[in-house]
């Protein structure tokens, strides 16, 4: 099982980044997918999630209206489009796969996002 994140980097406040998470080794279409983030000295927090069929998405209050989560089951990839980035968005962003009603839960290695002028 692998979840490989990419797309992180350094961006100025107000800028945009698009994170990708490529999945392999499991039946991607059966899994709810989420992005979490962890800032230095803080607990990991849920940023956004999408159901297995892509019908329903949910966002944390802090990113709603700025971030958009999408998935492509054909490409086994989930994306996080991040616009109007703020310094408080600085964190390591992690991709997560969870199959409902099961113990199957997978994490990527994380990608660093730094928002600074």
Image (cartoon, rainbow, N blue to C red):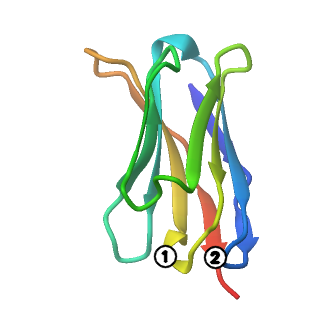
Classify mark 1: residues with Cα within 10 Å, few (<14), some (14-19) or many (20+).
Answer: few
Residue marked by disc 1: 88
Numbered mark located on residue 41 in the image:
none
Answer with left or right where residue 42 lies relative to residue 11: left
The residue nearer to you, when weighing 83 against 113, is: 83
Q: What residue is at 68 percent from the left and 48 percent from the top?
A: 19
Q: Is residue 115 above or below residue 110?
A: below
Q: Which residue is mark 2?
A: 115
Q: Quadrant of the C terminus?
A: bottom right
* Quadrant in the rendering for residue 103: top left
Element type at marker 1? helix
Q: Earlier in the sequence, mark 2 or mark 1?
A: 1
* Residue 87, image quadrant: bottom right
Give percent across and percent down for residue 61: 36, 56
Q: Position of residue 48 (x, y in %)?
A: 45, 44
Q: Closer to the camera, 19 or 43?
A: 19
């Amino acid at each position: 099982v692998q979840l490989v994140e990419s797309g992180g980097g350094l961006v100025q406040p107000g800028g945009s980044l698009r994170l990708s998470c490529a999945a392999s080794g499991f039946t991607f279409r059966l899994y709810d997918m989420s992005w979490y983030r962890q800032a230095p000295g803080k607990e990991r927090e849920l940023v956004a999630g999408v159901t297995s069929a892509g019908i329903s998405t949910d966002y944390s209050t802090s990113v709603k209206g700025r971030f958009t989560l999408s998935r492509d089951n054909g490409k086994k990839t989930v994306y996080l489009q991040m616009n109007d980035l703020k310094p408080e968005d600085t964190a390591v962003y992690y991709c997560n796969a969870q199959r409902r009603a099961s113990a199957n839960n997978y994490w990527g290695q994380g990608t660093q996002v730094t928002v600074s002028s």
